[in-house]
Image: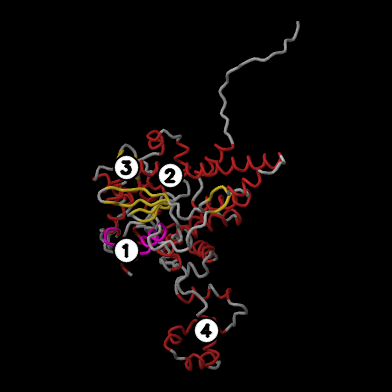
Amino acid sequence: MANNVGLFLEQSNRLVISPQMYQAIEMIQLSLPELINYINNELVENPLLEVVEEPEEQGEDSWLDGIMEEVMSSDENDQWSGDNPQDAELPLLEGRWFDGGSLQEYLMEQLRFIKHSSGFSEKTYKTAKYIIGNLDSNGYLTASLEEIAEALKISVAESQEALRIVQELDPPGVGARDLKECLKLQFHLIPDCPPKLTELLDYLDDLAAGHLKKIASALGITTSEVRSLGELLKLLDPKPGSRFDQNTDIRYIIPDAVIKKVGDDYVVLVNENDIPKICINESYKRALMAQDDQTIKKFVREKVSSALNLLKSIEQRRSTIHDVLEAIVARQKDFLDKGVSALKPLTMKEIAEELGLHESTVSRVSANKYVQTPRGICPIKCFFAGSIGQEKEITAEKIKDELKKIIAEEDPQKPYSDQDLVSIFQKKGIKIARRTIAKYREELWIPSSSLRKKASRE
């Protein structure tokens, strides 16, 4: 049988991603800082790209100036609800309400890491996690080892071991039960720490009052030495958790976009102020194309094509973020007006279908990006809230918000147990399991009923 050689046409379905399409997909998922780094790398790689120089002084009405003004100060229209700032609604971070600077999140990231490297038990990990949840805004432990042991049904020794692990985390001094312990935990930061410094901790009140002679007599040293030891203590941080204050943390977040209220409507502005303005250097391009060397001309054509694709991808990223946020705003206007209690169930698939995009595109737009809203800075992901059970209008965020309100109004001497809270929600027409209540309470850093009752007595 003869083998025939010839040309044949055949149809087939294959997904082929071009380099240009890959670049566009990659850039959509980049956060603003990542995008800036990406563009800077392209400027190094592509000699035909240049930055468009802009005047140094952009005026007080520049985009970023306006954003930072709103972040660091707010007017009456931007105040969080509630009279107490501690009770105010705060922006979502990774699917949970950002609770004043993320000291707990920072510690939990470290704890998760050392769990894998140190290999301590799951019980110790959970106990350390519980301890982190009971730290106040200054980083001090608000519950005793006995209370922790009782609440978790473990021994005091096990509580002590978990506390030791927490106290080894950064920032130094975290997990202390009083000022003396907090400072002592930081002694390793002082080179050649003098032994007398430990004894000085017993006289902190006298030191604050300036009773140097009394301290010198008690420690058997001179007043000059007491003064020198006091200067060493000033190098330490008496409130290691305070550096994670809400305002300090949020100021370092540069949002990818801003949602601004204008009249009764909301407008979406994508942050382009921090992105380097780039263009093709036409003079350099013409000079190279004038060369007779075909290799040089090919190089120029490739770099021009690469530059044009980059500019197109940057614009596509901007327009996609803008369109997705506009669609979200249309669905979540009540949240922007009233707060988390008005957040509606919303999925990425719904937004994707509305805009004619693939769901993965909406997911990339939402990844690692923040938006400034009248409700503060929050991740784009925070707008996508799942529903609870058969209650299609009840989100996890609504449950948490209601949970905070119920506990805030409880009798401190007779705090609600998790089962009591289940019954209260059932009376409101919301079916929720006790373990879910416990989970949400833990995520909100709300202690158990026994610890809340103990704290009220103290």
Dominant secondary structure of the residues highlighted in magenta in the image: helix
Q: Which of 26 and 376 is in front in this view?
A: 26
Q: Whole-percent x and y of residue 98? A: 40, 56
Q: For mark 1, give the secondary structure.
A: helix
The three-letter amino acid code for the residue at tag 2 is: Ile
Locate residue 374: give its quadrant.
bottom left
Instruction: Say whether disc 3 or disc 1 marks the residue closer to the N-terminus.
Output: 1
Direction top: furthest residue: 1
Name the side, left or right, on which 78 lies relative to 46. Answer: left
The three-letter amino acid code for the residue at tag 3 is: Ala
Tell me the CA gap for discs 4 and 1.
Answer: 35 Å
Residue at which label 3 appears: 330
Magenta span: 63-77
Q: Which of 12 and 317 is in front in this view?
A: 317
Nearer to us: label 2 or label 4: 2
Residue at which label 1 appears: 85
Q: For mark 4, give the secondary structure.
A: helix
Residue at which label 2 appears: 321
* 69 part of magenta stretch: yes
Near mark 3 (Cα within 10 A), the count class, few <14, some 14-19 or many ≥20, is: few
Instruction: Say whether disc 4 or disc 1 marks the residue closer to the N-terminus.
Output: 1
Q: Whole-percent x and y of residue 379? A: 42, 50
Name the side, left or right, on which 31 lies relative to 417. Answer: right
Q: Which residue is drawn at 45% across and 58% down?
A: 253
Tell me the CA gap for discs 3 and 4.
Answer: 58 Å
Q: Residue at x 24, y 45 (%)?
A: 428
Q: For mark 3, give the secondary structure.
A: helix
Q: Nearer the viewer, residue 210 or 77?
A: 77
Residue at which label 4 appears: 231
Instruction: Say whether disc 1 or disc 2 marks the residue closer to the N-terminus.
Output: 1
Instruction: Say whether disc 3 or disc 4 marks the residue closer to the N-terminus.
Output: 4
